[in-house]
Image (cartoon, rainbow, N blue to C red):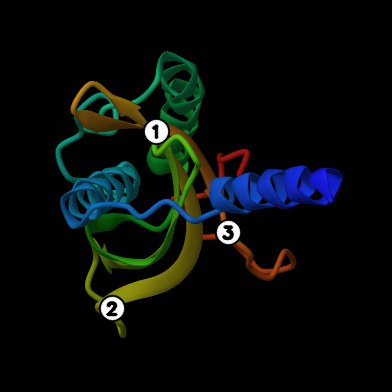
Amino acid sequence: MRATAVLLVAAALLGASATPVALAEADQGEILGIAQRYLHNRAQKVTTGPQTPGFGVPVTPELATRLAVHETKLEAARTSARTRYRAAVVETSAERFDVDQTGRTVVARVHEHAELYFAEAGTAEFTGYGLPHLLTFRRAGEGWVLADVALGHYKHCALLPETQQPSAC
């Protein structure tokens, strides 16, 4: 009987540790804001608009190194492309926030819908795309920093937009 009670207590403790951790609404808003700025700034990298270094969001040192490579490749693609875009409009929506048990790491499943506006007049004003992303965030003090970027599930045979071409996603 005593062994059964010990097993039940152990099972209850294990069950308690698997309880999903909720993410505060303010944290959701901050994370979605960072995701929006990152994806918008990434899309801007393929336009003829003013270019600023970086992606305009707080990132971990490891991700900063990877994104510097992405930025160089996006710049090369932008300057060599036959199709020119004058502007990008990006809308980001959150599908889900997966929080680890410590509450210090969050994987945000977001959807990006972007429109790239052609620099030259033609039959169409813009081209658009939609992509799922998995963005990992880590708690840094009272805020969040972007720690990893990856494409979510998409058709792997599909042609990716210019904003994602150099990515290792």
Number of marks in the image?
3
Indicate the position of residue 82 as horizontal and vertical percent values. Answer: 44, 53
Q: Which residue is mark 2?
A: 122
Q: CA distance from mark 1 to mark 2?
A: 48 Å
Say which mark, if any, is on residue 104: 1
Q: Residues within 10 Å of mark 3 (few under 14, many from 20)?
A: some
Residue at the image position 31 percent from the left and 52 percent from the top: 23
Mark before the other along the chain sequence, 2 or 3: 2
Image position of 12 (left or right of 59):
right
Q: CA distance from mark 3 to mark 1?
A: 21 Å
Residue at the image position 72 percent from the left and 64 percent from the top: 156
Q: Quadrant of residue 55?
A: top left
Q: Which amino acid type is shown beneath numbered disc 1?
A: Arg
Mark before the other along the chain sequence, 3 or 1: 1
Image position of 150 (left or right of 44):
right
Indicate the position of residue 146 as horizontal and vertical percent values. Answer: 37, 34
